[in-house]
């Protein structure tokens, strides 16, 4: 963190304290309170850490007011339009776009690590068939550390590199196997002659009884979903990965922790919640009823997939995702799918209603990604696992950055305590 000559003055009980102010390359200034407790004997209070910078980072920057998302300085719309997922992975991991030779080497390393240890098949069979794929992913990813002992030493830069490549390569295989297991079909092994997105689609939808040809439009849409979810700064799951990492936990355990956090409906489960809402609406003629409910302050119903906690304007990822959604729906058609019919009509109704546009409640990335995945044939239970495999590279990039940070300390948030003060134990016969 760069030194700054600016300071903030805090007065407590008539005594002044000088706090350093650091200026980032983008975003608001940050008041450094690390010595506040030692000097003044007070904590700060920030539930949800919405006004607290927990780390230094050079990976991703978000300006919610402008609707801007940058990876290493590159706008997400340019990356989604001109790049592809594995190139974005390289960018996030190493800080710069790769040369042709670097990209070829990186893609080769990922491709040649997509298989998982054969004994891990027994882990899947230990789950009930109706287990949620996210439950399976949390367990199986955590178990990677039991099979790949040669890449768990976080003090070894080479082992960190090997673990990173392994997780980027194996998460699609694990997610696809979780899906296949949940529907009672045999696992499909990865193929080295397919690109990352096509390989994942084939592992999900191929069966031994017939050949499966990946449609390039669907593959491109899948790649964009991966790209648009690759990283999103210090969100809940990324902060979970960092907090787990701060204890020195192995990388597989840290990513499993991130997957567990992502499972929440307020985070990675938002696109699943959005599709379930569309299914609840049922038919386009019921949309006015639900629009009215969304406007009613006394009704707990909210339109899922609209607006965003960080973006106070249009979600920059949603613009690209909408283009993919239009391409996929045009390819596959929506005439016979009532959920997708509702989605298209709800989008039109909300964008035409001043109540939503004035409040900047535009369709977000979860709204469009859910539509695409539904059209492709994925059940809602697979939406969050796909998010998890997409976000893995972001978690790993943040993990690697944190491990290399000389300021690394184990995470230890403080609290505002309102419980009982000291009291003596009372024997049970006297209570």
Image: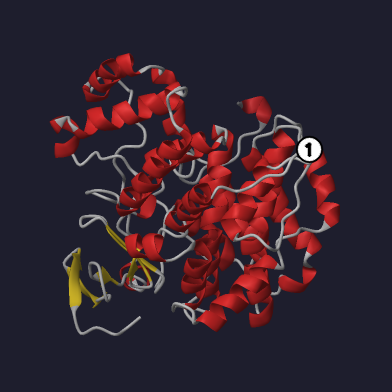
Count neighbours of disc 1 (C-alpha within 10 A) and say few if under 14, some if 14 to 19, many if 20 or more.
few
Q: For residue 58, which quarter of the picture? A: bottom left
Number of numbered discs present?
A: 1
Residue 165 versus residue 311: which sits nearer the camera? 165
Residue, x 49% and y 35% (percent of image)?
Answer: 375
Q: Position of residue 106 (x, y in %)?
A: 60, 75
The answer to whether residue 228 is visible is: yes
SS label for mark 1: loop
Residue 104 versus residue 159: which sits nearer the camera? 104
Q: Label 1, on which residue?
A: 209
Quadrant where the image shows the N terminus: bottom left
Q: Position of residue 208 (x, y in %)?
A: 79, 41
Quadrant where the image shows the C terminus: top right
Residue, x 51% and y 67% (percent of image)?
Answer: 89
Q: Position of residue 239 (x, y in %)?
A: 47, 58
Q: For residue 233, which quarter of the picture? A: bottom left
Query: Image check: 328 left or right of 118?
Result: left
Does residue 181 lie above or below 170 as drawn? Answer: above
Residue 59 versus residue 30: which sits nearer the camera? 59
The answer to whether residue 156 is visible is: no
Residue, x 77% and y 44% (percent of image)?
Answer: 187
Does residue 388 lie above or below 346 as drawn? Answer: below
Q: Position of residue 254 (x, y in %)?
A: 61, 60
Does residue 391 lie above or below 110 as drawn? Answer: above
Does residue 63 lie above or below 58 as drawn? Answer: above
């Amino acid at each position: 963190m760069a030194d700054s000559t600016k300071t903030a003055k805090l007065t407590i009980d008539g005594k002044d304290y000088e706090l350093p102010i650091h200026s980032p390359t983008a975003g608001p200034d940050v008041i450094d309170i690390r010595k506040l407790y030692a000097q003044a004997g007070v904590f700060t209070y920030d539930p949800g850490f919405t006004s607290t910078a927990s780390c230094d980072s050079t990976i991703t920057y978000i300006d919610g007011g402008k609707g801007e998302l940058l990876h290493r300085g590159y706008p997400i719309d340019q990356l989604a339009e001109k790049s592809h997922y594995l190139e974005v992975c390289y960018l996030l991991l190493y800080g710069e776009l790769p040369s042709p030779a670097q990209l070829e080497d990186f893609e080769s390393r990922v491709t040649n690590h997509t298989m998982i240890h054969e004994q891990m098949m027994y882990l899947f069979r230990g789950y009930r068939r109706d287990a949620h794929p996210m439950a399976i992913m949390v367990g199986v990813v955590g178990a990677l550390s039991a099979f790949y002992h040669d890449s768990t030493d976080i003090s070894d830069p080479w082992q960190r590199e090997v673990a990173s490549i392994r997780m980027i390569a194996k998460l699609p295989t694990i997610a696809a196997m979780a899906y296949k297991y949940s529907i009672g079909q045999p696992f499909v092994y990865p193929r080295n002659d397919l690109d990352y997105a096509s390989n994942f689609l084939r592992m999900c939808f191929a069966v031994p009884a017939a050949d499966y040809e990946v449609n390039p439009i669907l593959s491109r849409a899948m790649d964009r979903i991966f790209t648009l979810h690759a990283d999103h700064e210090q969100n809940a799951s990324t902060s979970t990965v960092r907090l787990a990492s701060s204890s020195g936990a192995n990388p597989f355990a840290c990513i499993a922790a991130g997957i567990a956090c992502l499972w929440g409906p307020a985070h990675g489960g938002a696109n699943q919640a959005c599709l379930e809402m569309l299914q609840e609406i049922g038919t386009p003629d019921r949309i006015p009823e639900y629009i009215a409910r969304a406007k009613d302050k006394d009704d707990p119903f909210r339109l899922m997939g609209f607006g965003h906690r960080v973006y106070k304007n249009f979600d920059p990822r949603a613009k690209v995702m909408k283009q993919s959604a239009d391409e996929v729906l045009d390819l596959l058609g929506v005439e016979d799918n009532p959920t997708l019919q509702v989605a298209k009509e709800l989008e039109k109704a909300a964008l035409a209603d001043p109540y939503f546009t004035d409040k900047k409640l535009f369709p977000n990335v979860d709204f469009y990604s859910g539509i695409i995945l539904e059209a492709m044939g994925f059940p809602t239970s697979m939406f969050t696992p796909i998010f998890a495999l997409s976000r893995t590279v972001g978690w790993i990039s943040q993990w690697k950055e944190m491990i290399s940070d000389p300021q690394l300390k184990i995470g230890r948030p403080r609290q505002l305590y309102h419980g009982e003060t000291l009291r003596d134990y009372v024997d049970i016969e006297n209570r």
